[in-house]
Image: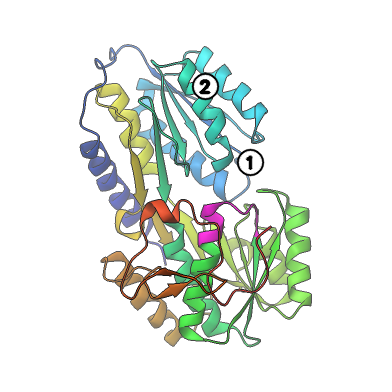
Amino acid sequence: MIDRRRLMGVATSFAIAVAATFVASSGPAMAQSTPLKVGFVYVGPIGDHGWSYQHHQGLLAVKKEFGDKVETTYVENVPEGPDAERVIDQLASQGNKLIITTSFGFMNPTVKVAAKYPDIKFEHMTGFKRSDNLATANIRFYEARYIAGILAAKVSKTGTIGYIGSFPIPEVVMGINATYLGAKSVNPAIKLKIIWVSTWFDPGKEADAAKALADQGVDIIMQHTDSPAPVKFAEERKIFAVGQASDMKAFGPNSVLTSIVDNWNGYYIARVKAVMDGTWKTGDVWGGFNTGMLAMGAYGPGVSADAKALADAAKDKISKGDFHPFTGPMKKQDGTEFLKAGEKIADKDLAGMNFYVEGIEGALP
């Protein structure tokens, strides 16, 4: 179960660490009498109780930390593509000196707008394109998905896990692979059924996908979509689920095994402070269990003592750096080797992952 006071403490420590990582000055500190204007762009509503909700908690943490030294703005429900570029450009023209865009599909629009406004700092979450005024950050979601796979395999009676995918981009694909690898470590015969819904947030589509999976014999629902609709369906169907981005136990008190909880607070606080201090510079940060950017939500009643012990042991090894979920020998779905024995995958290869690992059935869209 998450100890939120401890998590905030870790996040604060992480904020200090991030600030120390980006040490090169990129301009004079802002006058203290002038609030720093910070704009956020969300792909979904702040009430999605998942991805955008957690990013908005980061905005609120920034306001709490800096008070009247900051002026924050956010735009929610922004589609990926041309609309995103218009929104980001508008935030830049309104005088925001730091703009944070929070979805993979905002990458190219952010790059374009950043090139137009070299004096504005930009932060893009989960992307890989950077420039002198554009930094990136990501969370090692795959660490938690590996743990969730372990729990799912321990709990499942049908030996079949369902997974609702949004879009076949690397962060989603690596999560599916990590889930399968974690589950396979417990049950080598585990099956993983995947339905792609081509949306980040659409409760109706997500619920329909959950039903379709359950009708195929799935008794654990996992998701890389942002609403609690799959969790609610699992509760009604009396099967199990894993929450996404925030702790979703309230939506499925009996069904939720755990949730994959993102915590952007410390990172956002550190980056706002760096702009204020004139020490901001571009870079790339990946935070996992060991930084407090990632946590497991409270275990539900469906998690047995031995399942909890197994999951906690694996989480401890990952947190300490003693184990990486993507450690060879490991093959792609087509049987070709991509990791030799003992070899750990590089972050650049994770960021470009476009294949299933061996054992997953079906094809990527």
Was residue 167 drawn as part of the magenta stretch in this picture? yes
Residue visible at 39% across and 28% down? 131
- Look at mark 1 in the image and give the residue it sits on: 44
Image coordinates of residue 226 in percent, x first then y, are: 62, 52
Q: Amino acid at mark 1?
A: Gly
Residue 195, by quadrant, is bottom right
Left or right relative to 132: residue 126: right
Q: Magenta segment: does it hold 146?
A: no
- Among all residues in the image, which is located at the extreme front? 336
Q: Position of residue 99 (x, y in %)?
A: 46, 26
Q: Residues within 10 Å of mark 1 (few under 14, many from 20)?
A: many
Q: Nearer the viewer, residue 90 or 33?
A: 90
Rendered location of residue 29, percent (x, y): 25, 17
Look at mark 2 in the image and give the residue it sits on: 113
Say whether disc 1 or disc 2 marks the residue closer to the N-terminus: 1
Is 143 positioned to the left or the right of 246 in the image? left
Question: Residue at left 33%, top 76%?
Answer: 341
Amino acid at the residue labelled 2: Val
For the residues labelled 1 and 2, the Cα–Cα distance comes to 21 Å
Residue at figure coordinates x 62%, y 29% from the top left:
84
Residue 301 can be seen, yes or no: no
Res. 356 mark: none
68 over 142 or under it: above or below: above
Look at the numbered disc 1 and give the secondary structure of its residue: loop
Percent x, y of residue 52: 56, 43
Range covered by the magenta-colored residues: 165-174
